[in-house]
Image (cartoon, helix red, strand yellow):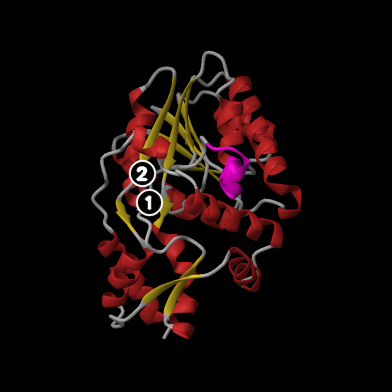
Amino acid sequence: MKIVLTGSLGHINLPLTKQLVDKGHSVKVITHNAEHVKDIEKLGAIPVVGSISDENFLAATFAGAEAVYLMVTLTNANPEDGIEKIAEKQANTYSDAVQRSNIKQVVNLSSVGANLGRESGALYLYHIIEKTLKKLDDVNITFIRPTAMYYNLFCSLADIKQQRKIITNADINQTQSWVAPEDIAPVVAKVLTSRQTGKNIQYVASDEVSYQEIAKIIGMKIGNPNLKSSQVSDDQMLKILTNRGIPEKIARELTKMTKCRRESDFYADYRAHQPKLGPTKMKDFARLFAQVYEKQN
């Protein structure tokens, strides 16, 4: 199959590209950074340099493809635009490009919480994108909804080193669902190449543990068996995030997201579509976390 991937060679795309190429598919990888061209070529894929905010570029790149993989993050967005504007602009760009290129098979990387409203904070981005893409007639779309990414815990490295604890505004005793990028890639690859019909939702998760359990697991791997998780107020968390250099508007949305997870039945839709947990558990990620932790000593 001829497949186009957005997302360059990120956490999910790197293993996804490898898997698709190894299966004999022709894969174009869109990247905004020309420095990634050689790395994409080494995988046997075709690099295409451009911006996912450029509808004309996307339409031209999608042309002739049998399936496309669409993703979006806040990484390169203008925080002053706000969640709604960021999401609406990207959703409309993707929607128009898909229509113009006559694509019939789409896989969209969404997120747990995409079924919720404005109360979900940063996750409302995915609600808007899903809502827009669902309006595409005669286009088969699967929305992949991963849960919290393991690698988000790297944000706690400094706190663990300086304060000997993981700091969060989440309920530290509440079980959360987590996922490894390497467990998402095979799910996306299967959906991209299976020609599913209609509009579908598929959750992806690897493990279900609380922050207190995470502290024990990571603590054992880094040689600090007394490592704890510490729950702070939303206002305190907002201050911590802005001190890390996160723009205030984005920090507020991230804080609101965790508050929603803490105060509502956040995982109701996840349970209704309960996925089989992937093989990569928190203890597996903890080994990688420990390696990064040691390198920073």
Q: Is residue 121 magenta?
A: yes
Label 2 packing within 10 angstroms: few (<14), some (14-19), many (20+):
many
In percent of width and height, residue 174 lies at 38, 57
Q: Position of residue 63 (x, y in %)?
A: 56, 25
Majority secondary structure of magenta residues? helix
**Which residue in the protein does label 1 denote?**
181
**Residue 164: quadrant of the picture:** bottom left
Check disc 2 and report the residue beneath it: 185
Q: Residue 224 falls in which quadrant of the image?
A: bottom left
Dot 1 falls on a residue whose secondary structure is helix
The answer to whether 100 is drawn above or below residue 257 in the figure is: above
Which of the image's four quarters has the N terminus?
top left
Q: Which residues are magenta?
A: 116-125
**134 to 178, vertically: above or below:** above
Which amino acid, by three-letter code, is at mark 2?
Ala
Q: Nearer the viewer, residue 186 or 54?
A: 186
Whole-Å distance between the Cαs marked 2 and 1? 6 Å
Asked if disc 2 and disc 1 are in contact, CB closer than 8 Å, the reply is: yes
